[in-house]
Image (cartoon, rainbow, N blue to C red):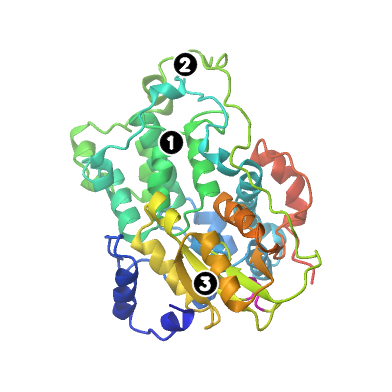
Amino acid sequence: MTVNDLARITDPEELRRLLVAEFPEISDEVHPKTQRGGRIAALEVLRKVKPQGYERSRNFLNGEVTRLSPYLRHGVLTLAEVRDFALEQVTRSDEAGKLINELGWRDYWQRLYMQLGDGIWQDREAYKTGFAASHYKNELPQALLEGTTSLACMDGFSRELHETGYLHNHARMWMAAYVVHWLGVRWQAGARWFLSHLLDGDPASNNLSWQWVASTFSNKAYIFNRENLERYSGGSFCRECVHARDGSCPFEASYEALSEELFPRLKDGMDRTASVRPAARVAQGVVKPSRSGSDSVSGKALIWVHTDGLNAGTAGFTRYPGSASVFVWDAKWLRDERISMKRVRFLAECLREMPVDVEIRKGDVAAQVLAAAETSGADYVVALRTPDPRRLAAAMRIEQRIPVVWIDVSPFVESAREFDLKRFSRYWGKAEREAMQPTRR
C-alpha cells in the first residue's frame, strides 16, 4: 500500500472497508462523530479557536474547548504554530494566556517523556491516600468497560470514549478519580484503557495526568463531588441517573466527607504515607537519540514517517526533496496497546495527505525501515525527533546498519534549556515568558 492508495479514496465507506481488510485483528467500528484526521481538518479546527472563550468556558463540557489535541499529539500541528495563531487573535497576549498555558502542559509532559522513557508507567511518587500501591487492584471492572455501572455519568463517559475516541478533560479527570479512588484500581489499568481509544492518546500526557489524579505525581489526590459534576456538566447526567433520584449517588457529599470516606487512614491532615519510600526516580527504558540534523551525512536519504510526525511540512520532505519515504504500521504497538479502529482511521486520514509516494508497510518497524532503505538504495534515514521509546529503540536497531538523523520543528520554548521538571509550576515559572512570545521568524 502507498499513500496514493489512501488519497484516491473519497468515500468513507470505501476507506472503512480498506482498513478492515488491512487490520482484521481490530474488531470495533468507527462512530460518525469521530473526529476527522489530517492537516486540512486540523486547520479548519484551528481557525475556529477563540482564546478568550476558551479561558472563560473550557472547564464546562459544552465549553469552547479547542479539540486540537489529536493533531498536536500526531505532529499535524505544532505547539508553536497553535501558540502563534492564538496570539494573532488577541490584542493583549494575556488574553491567550490560559490556552498557551495548556500548550505548556504538553511541552512539559514531552520533556518528562524524553527524560523518563518507559518510566512513565511507574509510580513517580508514593500515593498520598494513606494506601500503598499494593492496595489497588490491577483490572478494571467489566461494567465500567461496557458502560453498565448504572452511574449515568460514568456510563456516558465510557460510551463516549469507546464510540468517538474523545473525552473532555474534565470528564477524564472525573473518570480517573472514580477508577482510582472509588473503585480502588491502579492508575496504570485506566491509562491503558484510555490509550486504546483516545485519538490524542499520548503515553506521556495520558499517564502523567492519571498519576496527577492518583497522587503519585502530585501533592494530593484529586477527587470530585456531585456538585462539581453537575455544575460543569449542566446536570445532564444527574437528571437521568437512578442514584441521584434515590439518594445513593457515591459522589453526593462534601469534599471533606468524601475525603474521610475514601482516605480513612489520613487524619487531621496528616499523610500516613509520608514514611513510605517514594518510587525510585530512575528513567527505565530510556533511549536517547544520537544524531541531530546538523551532523554531516552524505548520500541518499530515506524519510521515515512515524505517528509523531504526520505533517508533510515538518516530516522532512522539504529538507530532503526527492527522497524515498516509508511509514510503518507498528504491529507490536497495535497489539500491545489494543489500538482501536478509531485511532487507525484517524492516522490513515492523516497519512492520506502526505506525499503520494510514501510507502506504507506493516510489521516490525526497524526491519521494515531497513528493508525500505535497501530497496531505495538509501545511505541514511531521517525522521522527526520523538521521545517515544519504541521509536528510539527501533532507531538504535536501524543505526546498526545505517545512520539515523533526527530533525526538529520550531520549539515551543528553547529546546536546549534545562528545566526543573519535578512539578509543572517549576517548569512554567521559567518557561512562561518565552512561551508567551510568538515564534521568531
Whether residue 49 is visible to the viewer of this picture, yes or no, is no
> Gap between marks 1 and 2, in whole Å?
20 Å
- Going by the numbered disc 1, the residue's amino acid type is Trp
Range of magenta residues: 313-317
Q: Secondary structure at mark 2?
A: loop
Q: Residues within 10 Å of mark 3 (few under 14, many from 20)?
A: many
Pick the front one: 336 or 365: 365
Image quarter (top left, top right, bottom left or bottom right) of the N terminus: bottom left
Determine which residue is flagged by label 3.
Answer: 42
| Image quadrant where residue 241 sits | top left
Left/right of residue 174 with respect to residue 158 in the rendered view: right
Determine which residue is flagged by label 2.
Answer: 266
Left/right of residue 78 with respect to residue 266 in the rendered view: right
Q: Residues within 10 Å of mark 2 (few under 14, many from 20)?
A: some
Pick the front one: 383 or 127: 383
Pointer 1 or 2: first along the chain:
1
Q: Position of residue 401 (x, y in %)?
A: 65, 61
